[in-house]
Amino acid sequence: MVRTMTLTSKRRFGGSLLLAGVAAVGLSIGSAAQAAEWKFAIEEIDGSVQDRYAQEFKRLVEEKSGGDITVTVYPYGTLGTSADLTELVTQGAIQFANSSPGHLGTLVPEIQVFSIPYLLSDNNEANKKVLTESPVIYERLGSEFEEKGLKLLTMYPEGEMVWTTNREIRKPEDFDNFKMRTMVSPMLVEAYESFGANPTPMPYGEVYGGLQLKQIDGQVNPIFAIEEMKFYEVTDYMIWAGQQQFTTTVVTNADWYAADLTDEQRKIVDETVAELADYIFEVQDEFNETRLEKIKQAKPDMKMIRLSDEERAVFEERAQAVRERYVEMVGEDGEEVLQALEEEIKQAEKEAM
């Protein structure tokens, strides 16, 4: 009850400001559907994994509709913060947005399960099956999304999260007095506290300056983001600890999807999302491989460390506290989601062998 009242108050306060802020790009979901112009806001800049997904979504939708539908893609910062983008979808100002579990946790607490370190598989084929087909995600969590006015269309990974730091990190003690930038997410804060760091939430657009000015000592992102945001320029180490894949969702407005779209338009959305499942997994592999080479060429003295199995196991053991914290925060529903998702991942790993 307390969480619902807080969220409602926030929406009432912020709704008019957010809608006013996007007046230049559209007035309402209904009018957008009538005009067959769909707006897709992403959490990253031009040329990113999310941008590639959105641009291919745009191409396929416009092709399938014979030009009757146009899709406009808005990169990070154009329409506000990541949290703003989800709010704009629920308010009806834009039709589609990427939203990471770290930001969605205030709306759907259970989705924070994807902020638990060492949850997903080392086998990306297994991850693809789970993230695109999971009944836990699309039925159980999907219904929670719809209660908040959102339709969960898909999830996909953007690559392994890599630490870029100003010192060598091989064990939790190395994180002593270390300010690690995180998203504004209770679960991510808990994760880096369990690893021994001082988690420091900071907006994505401020991370480079924060590293440069020594406000933070490190950050964590997929390789492509480290390269495109130039985080490697202001850190000395890249460290692979195997703790997490960065995942994102694509959401739309539930009422718009169910009631405002024609059957043909809804079919176009569903077919496009299904076609992009394999595509985006290949893209993120390509991006992270090629961007790592760019970093090596741009900064040959960048120290790159892959933790041994023994070193990684210490952090994985520390991460057990994050699972306990997740269950404590979310409750019995969260525990059931975590257990069911782990079973799906194990089954997908067996099938992928």
Image: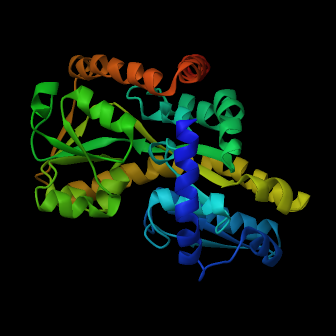
Instruction: Using the image as rendered, state which of residue 133 and residue 317 is in the foreground.
Output: 317
Q: Residue at x 11, y 26 (%)?
A: 173
Looking at the rendered image, the quarter that the C terminus falls into is top right
- The answer to whether residue 317 shows anywhere in this view is yes
**Which percent across, then down, holds residue 228?**
33, 62
Q: Is residue 333 above or below residue 59?
A: above
Instruction: Using the image as rendered, state which of residue 192 and residue 276 is in the foreground.
Output: 192
Q: Residue at x 54, y 69 (%)?
A: 18
Q: Quadrant of residue 63?
A: bottom right
Residue at the right extreme, as displayed: 263
- The answer to whether residue 281 shows anywhere in this view is no
Q: Quadrant of residue 350?
A: top right
Q: Is residue 77 above or below residue 164?
A: below
Q: Is residue 219 above or below residue 338?
A: below
Q: Residue at x 41, y 21 (%)?
A: 323
**Which percent across, then down, holds residue 340?**
60, 19
Instruction: Using the image as rendered, state which of residue 186 and residue 248 is in the foreground.
Output: 186
Q: Residue at x 68, y 30 (%)?
A: 140
- Apparent side of residue 332 relative to residue 220 in the rendered image (left or right): right
